[in-house]
């Protein structure tokens, strides 16, 4: 985290932190930029200097979340032995996130719903996250012994997406738990 000489978080980081809190809690489009600026305690010029616009801040927020999600997965996976267990760890992380976010759903799916235009900067950030997840699943499916790692990865991702969306709809973790069981049955080992 970038800090100023006084030890306080730099304006860009305060904007990112405020946006993350508000966007997760209320939705991206529902939160006006004036609210983010007030919550962060920074001037509008800081937004333009650091991110160029609210759209730039949105993309930075999604990239920041992606980096955090990758880090959480890497930490969880480092303690596991088999590729199968590493895939199932994604469901454990989704379970924890569902509880932490009070069943607000997948932030990438929420952002994709709010920004359907493929040219919007948020879409590129969403696509980067989805590409990482796809590559990760193909690799792990292959290392777990799946006969067709690409097809298996697509099935896992579909189950994962449905489980996370189902958790939002039901406001419970049961869909994620069921998704984990379905994937456990799908993977060799």
Image: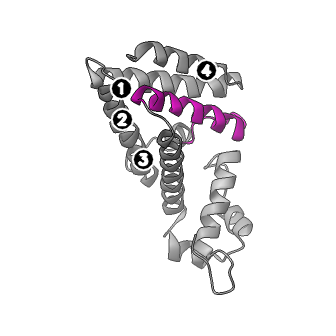
User: SS for tag 2?
Assistant: helix
User: SS for tag 3?
Assistant: helix
Q: From mark 4 to mark 3, how far is it between C-alphas?
A: 29 Å
Residue 1: image x %, image y %?
A: 58, 69
The overriding secondary structure of the stretch rendered in magenta is helix
Residue 86: image x %, image y %?
A: 46, 32
Of the image marks 3 and 2, the number of the one nearer the N terminus: 3
Q: From mark 4 to mark 1, how far is it between C-alphas?
A: 18 Å
> Badge 4: how crowded within 10 Å, few (<14), some, or many (20+)?
some
Residue 176: image x %, image y %?
A: 60, 23
> Circle 2 sits on which residue?
134
> Circle 3 sits on which residue?
123
Q: Which mark is residue 162?
A: none
Q: Is 145 on the left or on the right of 156, as rendered?
A: left
Of the image marks 4 and 1, the number of the one nearer the N terminus: 1
User: SS for tag 4?
Assistant: helix
Q: Measured along the vertical axis of the image, is residue 181 above or below residue 36?
A: above
Of the image marks 4 and 3, the number of the one nearer the N terminus: 3
> Circle 1 sits on which residue?
153
Residue 179: image x %, image y %?
A: 54, 19
Q: Residue at x 65, y 47 (%)?
A: 24
Residue at the limit of the structure toward the bottom, as seen here:
5
Q: Quadrant of residue 152?
A: top left
> Badge 3: how crowded within 10 Å, few (<14), some, or many (20+)?
many
Q: Give the magenta range.
A: 82-107
Residue closer to the observer: 78 or 42:
78
Circle 3 or circle 2, nearest the eye: 2
Circle 3 or circle 1, nearest the eye: 1
Q: Is 189 on the left or on the right of 114, as rendered?
A: left
Q: From mark 1 to mark 2, how far is it between C-alphas?
A: 7 Å
> Circle 4 sits on which residue?
177
Q: Residue at x 37, y 50 (%)?
A: 119
């Amino acid at each position: 985290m970038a800090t100023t000489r006084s030890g306080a978080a730099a304006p860009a980081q305060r904007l990112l932190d405020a946006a993350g809190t508000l966007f997760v809690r209320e939705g991206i489009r529902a939160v006006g930029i004036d609210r983010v600026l007030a919550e962060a305690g920074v001037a509008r010029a800081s937004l333009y200097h650091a991110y160029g616009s609210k759209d730039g801040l949105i993309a930075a927020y999604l990239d920041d979340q992606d980096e955090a999600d990758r880090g959480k997965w890497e930490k969880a996976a480092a303690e596991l032995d088999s590729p199968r267990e590493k895939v199932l760890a994604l469901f454990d992380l989704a379970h924890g996130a569902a509880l932490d976010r009070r069943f607000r759903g997948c932030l990438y799916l929420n952002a994709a719903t709010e920004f359907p235009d493929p040219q919007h900067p948020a879409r590129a950030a969403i696509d980067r996250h989805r590409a990482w997840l796809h590559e990760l699943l193909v690799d792990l499916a292959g290392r777990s012994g799946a006969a067709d790692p690409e097809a298996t990865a697509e099935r896992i991702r579909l189950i994962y997406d449905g489980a996370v969306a189902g958790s939002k709809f039901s406001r419970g973790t049961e869909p994620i738990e069921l998704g984990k069981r379905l994937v456990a049955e799908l993977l060799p080992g």
